[in-house]
Image (tube, coloured by chain):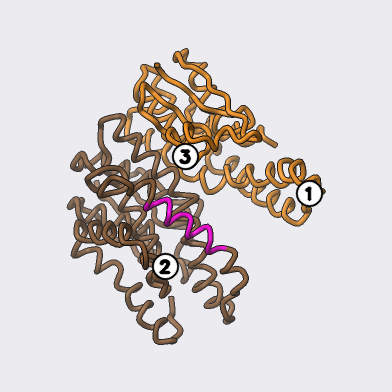
Chain colours: A orange, B brown
Amino acid sequence: MGLEVYFTILSQPSRAVLMFLESNAIPYTRKALDLRKGENRTEDYSRINPMMKVPAISDDGFNLTESVAILKYLANKYTVADHWYPKDIRKRAKVDEYLAWHHTNTRPACASLFFNEVLLPARTKQPADTVVVQSALTQIKNALDKLETMFLKDSRFLCGDEISIADLLAICEVMQN
Amino acid sequence: MVLTVYFDMLSQPSRSVLLFCEVNKIPYEKKVTHVGGGDNRTEEFQAINPVMRVPAIKDGDFVLSESAAILKYLAAKHNTPDHWYPKDIQKRAKVDQYVAWHHMNTRENSIRVFWTEVIIPMMRGREVDQARLQRQLPALEETIDRLEQVYLKDQQFLCGDDITIADILAVPELMQLYGAGRNVTENHPKLTAWIERVKNKLQPWFDEFHTPLYKMRQKRLKGEKAKL
C-alpha cells in the first residue's frame, strides 16, 4: 500500500505537500482527484477524509488531512534535512508561529481572491463581484506587507536563513494568483 | 529565565495558554494586555509581537506569538505529560490535524458570531445586525456538527481518549459564545459531555479564567448591556 497522496493540482496546499515529497525523494503514489466531477465526495474518499477536502494522505492505512499536519508528519517520519522543520525547539516554534498565522492570513486572503476572481465566475458564468475582489486584494496586500516587514525582515526565508515547510505553503498561495 | 505571558482574559487563545501553564505548573508571570484599552498597540508590546495580538510570550530573550505555536513550545520545553502533545508521530499528527482545522473552523466561526452579537453592537452602540448573524450561524452549526460527528465520534476528547492541546484550544472558543448568552451545546449531548470532561481536567483555573464570561452571560440574559 505505502503512502498515497490525494490531491488536486489547483489546490495550493496539495502542491506544497507534493513539492515536499518530491524534493525529499519520499516514495509515494499520486491519487489525483477531479473536484469538478465530485471525486472528493465519494464514500471511499470520505473514509480517508470526512471533511472531503484535499490534500489528504493514507500511509499504510493511517489517514491524515490538513496540509500543515501532513507536512509535519512527513518531516517527522522520514529523514529529511533539519531545516524543513527544525528539531531545535525555538526554531521549530518560529515555524509553528508562521504556520498558525498562515491559516488566518496568507491562506484565506489568497484563496478568497482566487475563488472570487476565477473559480466562482467560471462556475456561474457571471462576471466577478468587484467589491468582493477588491476586499480580497486588500487582505492580500496586508498579508504580503506582513510577510515582507515581519517574517522576511531580517532573514532570507520566512523562518530563518534556510527554507522550511512554512515557505512551501506560503509560496503556493502566492503563486495561485 | 522568566516566562512572561501577555494576555487578555477575554481572548480565547489567551485563556488556552494560561490554562496550559497552570495545569502543568509552569512558572510564569502574567502581563495583562487589555486589547480594548490599546495595551497591544504600545511600542513595548509591538517589540514582543509586531502583529499586536494576544497571547504572546517572552521566555528569557525569546518572543513568540500564536497560541498553537506557544502551546507546542511550552509542551516541548517543560516536558509536560505526553498526552498534551504526544511524541508518537501518528498521535501527534492527529493533534496537528485538529489544530490546523481549528483556525478557520472552531475559532473563525465562533469569533464571527461573537463579534456580530457582542463586539460590534458594543463598539458602535447599535442593535445586532440580524441579517449578518443569520448568514453566519450556519457555518457555526456546521462546525459544531463536525466537532461532534468527526472529532468526538468514537473518543472522549478531540484527538483520542485523553486531553490534548486541541481540547484546550477548542473549549475556550465555545465558552466565548456561552458568554454571549448563546447555548451552543443545546441538543448536543456529546459536546456537552466533552466540555464537562475538559473543564474538570482544568479546574479550578477554568472557572477562574472564565468568570468574566460567566458574568457577561448573566448580564446579557437579563437584558443588560455588558462592558468589555
Residue at horizontal 18%, vertical 65%?
A: B204
SS at mark 3 in the image: helix
On the image, numbered disc 1 is attached to which residue?
A128
Asked if the stretch drawn in magenta spans residue B144, the answer is yes
What amino acid is at disc 2?
A: Leu
Q: What's the residue at 28%, 66% (across, down)?
A: B209
Compute the Cα span from label 2 to label 1.
34 Å
Where does label 3 land, which residue? A99
Residue drawn at 48 percent across, 59 percent down: B140
The magenta stretch spans residue A174: no
Q: Are marks 2 and 3 on the same chain?
A: no
Left or right of residue A166: residue A2: left
Q: Which residue is mark 2?
A: B177
Circle 1 or circle 3, nearest the eye: 1
Q: Position of residue A42 (x, y in %)?
A: 52, 35
Judge by depth and name the residue closer to the eye, A15 or A90. Answer: A15
Labels 2, 1: one chain:
no
Helix, strand or loop for the magenta stretch, by majority: helix
Chain letter belonging to callout 1: A
In front here: B124 or A131? A131
Span of residues in magenta: B136-148
Q: Chain of mark 3?
A: A
